[in-house]
Amino acid sequence: MAAVAGGLEPEAAAAEDAVGDAADAVGPLAPPFLAGNRLSLDLYPGGCHWLLHLCAQQPTQLLEVEFLQLSGHEDPRLLEATLALLPQSLQRLRSLVLKGGQRRAALGACLRGSLTTLPTGLSGLAHLAHLDLSFNSLETLPTCILKMEGLDALLLSHNHLSELPEALGALPALTFLSVSHNHLRALPTTLGALSTLQCLDLSENLLDTLPSEIGGLSSLAELNLASNRLQSLPASLVGLRSLRQLVLHSNLLTSAPAGLARLPLLTRLDLRDNQLRDVPPELLDAPFVRLQGNPLGEALPDTHSPPGSPVALDVPQLFLTSDLDSFPVTPQGCSVTLACGVRLQFPARATATPVTIRYRLWLPEPHLIPLGPHDALLSGVLELQPHGVAFQQEVGLWLLFVPPRARRCREVVVRSLNDDTWSDLATQLEEETPKRLWAHCQVPHFSWFLVVSRPVSDSCLVPPEGTLLYSSGHPGVKVIFPPGVTTEPRRVHMQVVRMARRALLEEPEAAASPLLCLSQSGPPGFLQPVTVQLPLPPGVTGLSLDRSCLHLLHRAPPTAAWDDITAQVALELTHLYARFQVMHFSWYWLWYTTKTCIGGLARKAWERLRLHRVNLIALQRRRDPEQVLLQCLPRDKVDATLQRLLERYRGPEPSDTVEMFEGEKFFAAFERGIDVDADRPDCVEGRVCFVFYSHLKNMKEVYVTTALDRQAQAVRGQVSFYRGAVPEEVPKEAEAARQRKAADALWMATLPIKLPRLRGSEGPGRGWGPVLSLAPLNLGDAETGFLTQSNLLNVAGRLGPDWPAVALHLGMPYHELQRIRHEFRDDLDGQIRHMLFSWAERQAGQRGAVGLLVQALEQSDRRDVAEEVRAVLELGLRKYQDGIQRTSLAPGDLAPSGPSVSQSPEPAQA
């Protein structure tokens, strides 16, 4: 190795030294890493080791790789050494992604990668057009980038860059450049020489001026300079005739060139939250100009008005950049725009003394999102400190969110923590765009805040004289309080959730009324019965219904069970409604069904009404049905993912949507005789653990097997998904899974899996191919043990698409592999068996053949099959030794031909 590395660059020599260690640490490349011309190693541990080992093997697939993804969290020296080999090993590489941000700190913040530079030899990637170095620790731009003349897109966001070199203007093909969230204080004058540049993102930096040469970007269509410290704009901006979007919000601009309004293609000019006092009339009249949050806000038209009240001229305005997490507030008051987009309005005399306010954004971890059964989270979690400090006047708060798709009978509120209790604040909605809304509320003190969508809540104050409460979203739902129902006024709240018919999957003819939730303040009971009216289930009328099929269900939190209380109340039926009297409030539901016991069914349907965010899918490879892909993904990505996967996979439709939050675990357990066949650290007793993150692939690809006889018939089973703690005993039937009562082991969905019948035992022409014989074969010798033809068939049935790697490690030439592929095309089983048996026939009578097979399996990362082969050998050796003891033969008396006991004396009698 030292002799080979002597003539290389230092980085390449270091990479060559690392290849030996990588080869010992990993086997051949696993199928999920390499797909077509894409090599994705960013989500797997030891990605650099895998790539080094692959470069050492130099398989033909490596020559076709055009897209490479590596994690920026690798060891810096190992990463630099690995990158040094790319120009020689991946000569067709077009896209290189070296992002950080895949790991998170204890509190959920994204961690930057360790990348601080790039090896100089990387400029030898002649075809590289896309380079992503986001979320790393770069302080200066690597010099090799300046020599990549074919580079089309360069992403440098979320680094520590304080400047860009003048040589950046020498990249002739660059069309996309992102340097957001850095520490840039100035721009190079040569930036204007990038005549092909179409998109430039310099937001979230420390720029206070722009060079006049920026007007030379003749092809620029999008320019983002938001959240900087710009005080003026160069007049040359009016020469950007191709500009379509210009974003300048959250700066310190006091004026803007009038010619911007006359740019022929401009459709968006965002000047919000600046210090503009003198704006040309043509900018005021242009429909695409956004000017809110400036000192002249009171004179602006309301057509684009985002949040809230105009800013008084004598109130200071603060615009925080991404590197600031605190700001001062004086008794004079101020208007503050945080870097995350949140807005705060402190009126004069809101504080008696100066106060320093700190803010922080949290990921939506389960313990920070107090959601009800039918609530949906619409924003991150904002923390404002100091907690609990009361203001003399309420402070205005504006939170930006994307409205949910389903808005019928739902409302949006800001939820806040007050004395360890979460409560909803009076919230007003203000539209920025049809797809972006502001939630505005007044807060008396600071704590935690988030935006939540919930069913419409109606409330009323019940006096001793009684009253009537209607549902604003469902007019047929009402509650009648008679006189004398209470001695003191009580506040009663009502929520109504519309029932989706798809939840009643077990009985398509069943129907259910809206779900009613009633809560109150004060004592749990009333002095007089309260009358509740619910509409009858759809399709059911009081004139035609069968009363024996109508059930009134009751659920009292925190229990998860539904009780059938039909026999305990008097149901009064009209043509459209059912009325009944209760003394306590909780959940109520009308079901029309022929089921005799509907408690478990009602609970399941109710659970499906909860927050719908992700889907679970289970697919099998078309070419290797024993390889199962499990995936958890956001609901809006299901269709596109299935369309992309179904060429290589087949399987059932996705599961029903279930509740899932960022960072939450769930488990997939194979049942009815199907087990996971893989040496995985995340797999215990057939149960694979998932952790859902919305920005990751959330993909597990595992091999499954079964101990049942598959030569007679196919094996049918399922994979069941659980949320929370894994059940101690995985149920054997799907029905048992549905009826589990453990509160901490919520069953979510069961999807079918089928392992097809093995065809090998039926002879030639039925899975073996046209030329493979079934001649008896024993592989091995007396010292290392024998593998029978049946043992080899089991090995062949387990290899799947890994068989070419095993064949190469067995010493078979590549041209023979190609011949087998062609001869047994569209028959994976035939390929595997022909390869294995043709090799075994050539090894007949040779010593060490079994050991060679075990070694090849381990080198191909099929240690699971290698362990089974070892177990077979140990069992055979043990039987052989038992036979020796029974025949009283000493080891020296054995014939050279091997462990044949047919010629041995009869076993001695005890």
Image: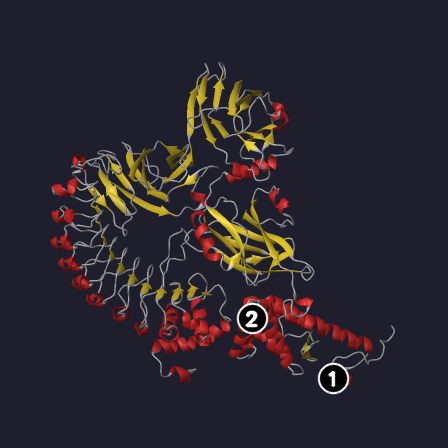
Looking at the image, residue 476 lies above or below residue 227: above
Mark 1 closeness class: few <14, some 14–19, many ≥20 residues within 10 Å: few
Query: What is the count of numbered marks?
Result: 2
Q: Nearer the viewer, residue 752 or 398?
A: 752
Q: Can you name the residue that lies furthest to the right here?
A: 909
Looking at the image, residue 558 lies above or below residue 844: above
Residue 897 is marked as: 1
At x 41%, y 46%, the residue is: 364
Q: CA gap, disc 2 to disc 1? A: 32 Å
Pinpoint residue 293: horizontal percent, then vertical percent: 21, 40
At x 52%, y 40%, the residue is: 608
Pinpoint residue 43: horizontal percent, then vertical percent: 44, 61
Q: Nearer the viewer, residue 443 or 72?
A: 72
Residue 607 visible to an observer of this rendering: yes
The kind of secondary structure element at disc 1 is loop
Residue 691 visible to an observer of this rendering: no
Colouring convention used in this rendered image of the protein: secondary structure
Residue 803 is marked as: 2
Disc nearer the start of the sequence (2/1)? 2
At x 50%, y 74%, the residue is: 24
The kind of secondary structure element at disc 2 is helix
Pinpoint residue 223: horizontal percent, then vertical percent: 22, 54
Q: Nearer the viewer, residue 571 or 225?
A: 571
Q: Closer to the observer: label 2 or label 1?
A: 2
